[in-house]
């Protein structure tokens, strides 16, 4: 079957996969002096040896080009009380310059921003990028880990934010 032959309705597909509850994270990178950030729920652990994780980036997103150019990225796994940050970094077309000022963060060893309020943080060096339709699967090796705060995780399920 060719990709243009569809036997599955895309709207139904979204509803079906939306029943899989996911955590929410903000992935960050830095190109020159400019920070880039994007909300994702397509973040997952891949391997323990070596330590690999992945996220998916839409090819038309500004973040896509930035993360491929930088080769390093940070992941901040969000607690339930950071829904506002998730919504902000999911919004298309927002100004890039100064976008992190509202949320306390620190710089990791690689220079990427890691949110102070996150329940888990990782710094990652890209090791592979795989074509996946309208997205790229960005795989990377974990270079540092942290647990800066505690609290229930922010979840995304059936098109809505939820928490435990």
Image (cartoon, rainbow, N blue to C red):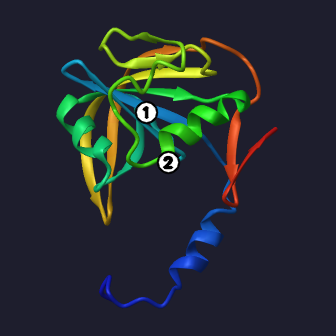
Horizontally, residue 30 falls left or right of residue 51, namely left
Horizontally, residue 12 falls left or right of residue 34, namely right
Return the disc, 1 or 2, that comes first in the chain's sequence: 1
Report the residue at 53% width, 20% height from top: 102
Q: Tell me the element at label 2.
A: loop
In this rendering, does residue 48 appear at all? no
Of the 4 image quadrants, the one containing the C terminus is top right
In this rendering, does residue 17 appear at all? yes
The number of callouts visible is 2
Horizontally, residue 62 falls left or right of residue 142, namely left
Disc 1 and disc 2: Cα gap in Å?
A: 10 Å
Of the 4 image quadrants, the one containing the N terminus is bottom left
- Residue 45 screen position, x and y as percent: 49, 37
Q: Tell me the element at label 1.
A: strand
Residue 27 or 140: which is nearer the viewer? 27
Q: Quadrant of residue 148?
A: top right
- Residue 125 screen position, x and y as percent: 29, 26
Residue 71 or 11: which is nearer the viewer? 11
Q: Is residue 68 above or below residue 111?
A: below
Q: Quadrant of residue 142?
A: top left
User: Callout 1: 10 Å neighbours few (<14), some, many (20+)?
Assistant: many
Kindly identify which numbered label has been placed on residue 27. 1
- Residue 96 screen position, x and y as percent: 34, 33
Q: In this view, does 44 lie above or below 52?
A: below
Of marks 1 and 2, the one in the foreground: 1
Residue 108 or 143: which is nearer the viewer? 108
Kindly identify which numbered label has been placed on residue 124. none
Report the residue at 31% width, 13% height from top: 111
Kindly identify which numbered label has been placed on residue 42. 2
Report the residue at 66% width, 36% height from top: 83
């Amino acid at each position: 079957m060719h990709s243009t032959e569809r036997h599955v309705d895309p709207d139904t597909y979204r509803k079906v996969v939306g029943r899989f509850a996911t955590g929410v994270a903000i992935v960050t990178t830095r190109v020159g002096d400019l920070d880039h950030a994007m909300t994702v729920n397509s973040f997952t652990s891949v391997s323990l040896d070596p330590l690999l994780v992945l996220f998916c980036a839409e090819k038309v997103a500004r973040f896509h080009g930035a993360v491929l150019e930088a080769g390093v990225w940070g992941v901040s796994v969000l607690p339930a009380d950071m829904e506002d940050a998730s919504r902000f970094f999911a919004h298309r077309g927002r100004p890039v310059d100064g976008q992190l000022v509202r949320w306390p963060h620190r710089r990791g060893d690689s220079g990427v921003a890691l949110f102070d309020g996150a329940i888990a943080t990782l710094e990652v060096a890209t090791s592979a990028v795989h074509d996946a339709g309208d997205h790229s699967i960005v795989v990377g090796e974990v270079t540092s880990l942290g647990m800066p705060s505690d609290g229930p995780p922010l979840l995304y399920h059936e098109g809505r934010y939820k928490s435990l």
